[in-house]
Image (spheres, grey):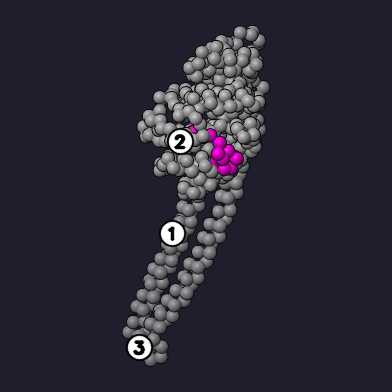
Amino acid sequence: MILHGNQRGGGRDLAAHLMKPENERVELVEMRGFIADNLKDAFVESYAVSKATRCRQHLFSLSINPPAGADIKDEDYVDAADRVEKELGLTRQPRAIVRHWKRGDDGVVRSHAHAVWCRIDVDQMKAVHLPFTKRKLREVSRELHLHHDLNMPPGLINSKDRDPRNFTLEQWQQCKRAKKDIHRLQEDFRDAWSISDSAAAFTHALEERGYILAKGKRGHVAVDFRGEVYAVRTYTGKTSKEIQEKLGTPDRQPSVVEAQTRAARQLVERLTALRVEQLKEIASNRAGALELKEKLQLKHERQMVRVRERHRRQQAHEVLIREARLRKGLPGLWDWLTGKRKRTLELNKAEAAKMANHRREELRAQRNRRLTVMKAQDEKSRLERMKHFEGIRELRDDAKRLMQVAPKESTHSRTSRPRRRSRIQFDSSLER
């Protein structure tokens, strides 16, 4: 199971998010340690207790996401929450667990769960300290994958694989072909809004989802890696007043051009790295092809040596057979007088020519097979090189398009600054 957790305030927004009717089904699995019997009042209760302390982020919210096709029951979600609270030191803290059923883009209904703890320890009247949360959640997630015999995603095996900029060439091409789902887009913005209680938290939540918060012409906007601009007010469904209260004035955020340039620079850097990887792979494939060609040549030479040696033995054996047909002494003289020896010599000569022709044909066929294999290998290597070079050209074209994203300031900002081309450079010398 994939675990994502963070400290937060905004209990009312969180309760509304957890109980939102957009889900196919919502079930309150557990309420523990709260006087209230519903989420909204329980989180208000947690907020009231936190007022006796300096803690502003009085809740710890955890999302529990099983992989597709996993048969996860309520008790499995409770067990996951128990493991997390033991690891984080939230044992005996008030807790609520909510399970959601949601229909995906493929029409299949899948479930996930949310667990929320009150961080305030009423005995000591202070918030439970939660250091190294991400690392601890990652360890618990590994334990759960092993416990339930689930396939562990690469992001848990190697944390670098979770970097949104750490994509492969195939993933980049697939991302270009994909079309954004408006419902998924709205869900990204609303989820980021619901789990955030400040501009910094909202900015971080958006960046985790692939967007950069920026200052638009009429307020806050978000920019994706393609340079598309999305109004925060439109996709969160919040009023300008609510956005102003949580995010402050948009002047604190970078401009659309700066955000686009930043997103483009990050991706251009990654695309440049991919081009270098492609060139290294071409060199490696070329060296491997040469090595394989040498091995094939050596293999064919050994086969030819074995064939020639077999032909030599066959020829020596045939010579003995033909010589045995020529009788000696008086029988030989009789064969010579009657003309039988002449006929035998002619037969031996015709048979020797036939076998020699047969051996030449076998050697020719052996050489043709060798040439066919070598040509096939050369053609395979050529196609692989062409594929890699096509990928490099595609990456170069993608980078050029990304570099043209930045100069769009006049359509999103009131300030009148001269439009300048991005200075992001995509080194063309890498192909040399």
Label 3 sits on residue: 334
Distance from the alpha carbon under mark 3 to that under mark 2: 116 Å
* Residue at the spot of label 2: 30
Q: Which residues are magenta?
A: 84-96
Q: Amino acid at mark 1?
A: Ala
- 43 or 18, which is in the foreground? 43
Q: Position of residue 414 (x, y in %)?
A: 61, 8
Which residue type carries mark 2?
Answer: Glu
Of the numbered discs in the image, which one, if any, rests on residue 27?
Answer: none
Q: CA distance from mark 1 to mark 2?
A: 77 Å
Residue appearing at x 44%, y 77% in the figure: 317
**Residue wearing tag 1:** 365
Crowding at label 1, few (<14), some or many (≥20) Cα neighbours within 10 Å?
A: few
Of the residues under marks 1 and 3, which one precedes in the sequence?
3
Of residues 239 and 374, the one nearer the viewer is: 239
Residue 121 percent coordinates (x, y): 60, 34
Circle 2 packing at 10 Å, graded few (<14), some (14-19), many (20+), is some
Marks 1 & 2, CB-CB < 8 Å contact:
no
Residue placed most toward the observer, 411 or 291: 411
